[in-house]
Each structure stands twice: as C-alpha cells, then as structure tokens.
Amino acid sequence: MTDNNIITSAEEHLLHTYNRFQIVLERGEGMYLYDVNGKEYLDLQAGIAVCALGYGNKKYTEALKSQIDKLMHTSNLYYSAPAMEAAEKLTKAAGMDRVFFTNSGTEAIEGLIKTARKYAFTKDGTTDHEIIAMEHSFHGRSMGALSVTGNAHYREAFEPLIGNIKFANYNDLESVKALVTDKTCAILLETVQGEGGIYPADPEFLKGLRALCDEKDILLMFDEIQCGMGRTGDFFAWQGYENADGTMGIRPDCMAVAKAIGNGVPVGAFLMTEKVAQSSMVPGDHGSTYGGNPLVCAAVSATIDIFSEDGILENVKSVAPYFEEKLQGLADKYPEAIKERRGRGFMQGLELKVSVGDVVKKGQSKGLLTISAGTNVLRMVPPLIMSRSDVDKAVAILDEVFSEISEG
Ligand SMILES: *Cc1c(COP(=O)(O)O)cnc(C)c1O
C-alpha cells in the first residue's frame, strides 16, 4: 500500500478527532523513525514522551516477547509475578508506598480524583470536597480528567463536568491560597506543565504548596505523566527539587504516571504514600479489567531495569545541559522568531513569535520530528537515549528551518 492509500482509507474510517500530519510511520531504530517510503526522521517527540528507550531496544522487546509466550492477560482477582515485580520497582523509583496500574494517563488522574475524595470522606464523613487544579494544565480527556484540565476550550462542549473544581494560576502560590477552604481536599498540578507550553514549577511554588498542604491536611498530587520517568534527569521531576531543609525531593502525597513507564505499551499508574492508602481506597472502591496485566507489567519492569542497566538517567543528566545550551544558542541567534527557551532536562520548549505549525512542518520535510504545545511553543521530548551528536543534528536542522523562516 502506498502512503496515499493508507491516508485515504484511514480518513474514511477513523473518527476525525486529530488533524494528522501526512506521514505514515512504519518502523523505528534507536533515535530514528522511518515512513513507508523509507524516509528517515530524527525523532524529538518519542510518541509524545512515551518511547524513552527509543525504538527497537532488544532487551525490552525480548522481555515482552517472552511474556507474550507465557501469559498476556489474567484478571486482577489473581496475583502474577510481573505485577508484583513492576509494583515493587515502580514504588521504589517513585518513593511511594502503593500503586494501582491503569491503562492510560487519563485513568491515573481519575484514580487521583477518587483517592482525594475518598480520603476526605473517610476523614469527615461529608461529601462536596473541593480540588484545586491549575490554569493551562492538561490531565486528560475523560470527564473526570477534563474537569481538572485548565483549558476552557477543551471543557466547554462537555459541561457539566464534575463539580467543585477550582483553578489557580500556576507558579502563583497566593492564587492557590486564595482558593483554599475547609472543603479543599487536594491540590493537583503537573510538576512541569507539558501541553500548556513547557512551564517548570518554580522551586518556591512547590515548597509553598508542600507547606500549605501539610498545614491543612490537603493532599498534594503531582501529575508526572509527561515530565516523569527520567525526562528531567531524575526518575521523577519532583525528586530534583530541594526542600526548605536542603534535602532533595519535594514529595507529593500521591502521583500519576503513564507515558514512558512502559515505553510504548498502554500503561499508567497512580501511586500514594501508606498514610493516604490507609485512609482512602478499600476493596470495591476501584478496579480495572486490563489494568496492570502481565504483559504491560513485564514492559514496566523491563523498562525500569534497562534504565539502571543502561544508565538512562545519567545520559539525560549529562546531555541535557548541552541540549539546553544549543537550543539557547538558537534562541539567541533568531530573536525575531524565538521569544524564549524553557524546560528541564529532555523536556524543552521554544516559545515562538512565528507559526509553530510552519516550523514543525519544515522540520519534517528535512527529516526532524517535533511537536507543538499550547498555541506557540515548539516542544521537544526526545527518547532519553539522545546523544550529543543527535543534538547537533537536530539543532542543525532547526537552524536551517529558522534561517529559512527569517528570510521570509
Ligand atoms: C498525556 C498526558 C495525560 C493524559 O494521558 P493519556 O495517556 O493520554 O490518557 C495527562 N497528563 C499529562 C501531563 C499528560 O502529558
């Protein structure tokens, strides 16, 4: 089949919820993707921050194949070794005590919302508790996750959503404090905002939120779906923030993860401390048919093993300053096209004064895949195996793109 046939037929049958690029991807190798015509693309989007290990990692694919040969699915009514191993490794990496596996990030957020309400209900026996979320946040597309997503355009047609959600301004502690009442049960935020335009949390903001939550017994909930799993150079982004007492890690009470934790199989999770677990979810409160089945748990387990065996976090820590420096170089060279560089580690954004769609498309024609975030931010969330020479290659292509755009 030619790419045109595939695109035409796909457009006839798939529900039109995406305006897709005219590219049909077929296979991948390391940092590269190939389309059906054999054209090569250096990939700085990783399936939107999913494919942390890049493409075709042998240890990973062998682990999945061997699990497929044994057992793909069973029910959560039984135990399985892959679920036990994945739970042990993920809670350890996340500094949390308990985990529930989901099939997506959105469902992990649903789990956090239910945990927050149940925790508060257990405490005072009343309902109508409130959750504070952030403007310009993104937490997913289900009715619950949409309710806490700070983008009125995504929410409007689907109202009424779940109630008692208030929106504060990100990185503005006073705006959060102004919304706290006796009914506030949780504060939910991305440690680094992704879809909203790559905005890292200020250290003072996170410190202030932690103190506020401790003082009022409010649950601090981090959405680490995009920024977690090594992307910022720590296993989870909050681990790279310093506390008031100088220790590392502004630890939330609960967190949601997904995207890179299974390197491409549909899996997410919500995690919590023992204290929260003891006063919230009990048998019958939550469940999932597929959630944490042997196949996806084998993927989570293999991904975490490969992170330590192959020094994935070390790679991000060592290459990220170079990546930032090179992107900053572009921002300095093309001030009429680039307003600002932002980000942490391998989660970088260039806020543009020119059309981000044009930059993405010109990059594609030159063999570079990037995506947008917000309305005017060029987003780069590459596989975590990216090397300095990959950075050089990507930045050289972006340099050509910005030079063409600047010439008009
Ligand atoms: C992608 C994303 C989600 C939603 O995850 P899905 O797997 O698409 O349901 C939620 N929060 C953040 C921060 C995300 O980046």
Image (cartoon, grey):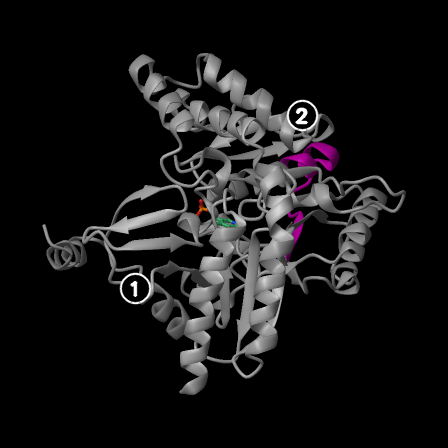
Residue visible at 58% across and 61% down?
A: 198
Label annotation for residue 97 = 2
Residue type at mark 2? Asp
User: Residue 292, position in %: x, y?
Assistant: 45, 26
Dot 2: within a 10 Å radius of its alpha carbon, few (fewer than 14), some, or many (20 or more) residues? some
Q: Is residue 60 visible?
A: yes
358 over 53 or under it: above or below: below
Q: Mark 1 or mark 2, which has the lower sequence index?
A: 1
Label annotation for residue 63 = none
Q: State the SS at label 2.
A: loop
Q: Is residue 254 left or right of residue 15?
A: right
Residue visible at 74% across and 28% down?
A: 275
Along the line of sight, which residue is nearer the eye, 319 or 247?
Answer: 319
106 over 39 or under it: above or below: above
Label annotation for residue 19 = 1
Q: Residue 351 magenta-drawn?
A: no
Q: State the SS at label 1.
A: loop
Look at the image and give the residue range highlighted in magenta. Answer: 118-133
Along the line of sight, which residue is nearer the eye, 175 or 58?
Answer: 58
Q: Residue lying farthest bottom?
A: 408
Q: Is residue 347 left or right of residue 95?
A: left
Q: Is residue 6 left or right of residue 371?
A: left
Residue visible at 31% across and 19% down?
A: 68
Residue type at mark 1? Asn
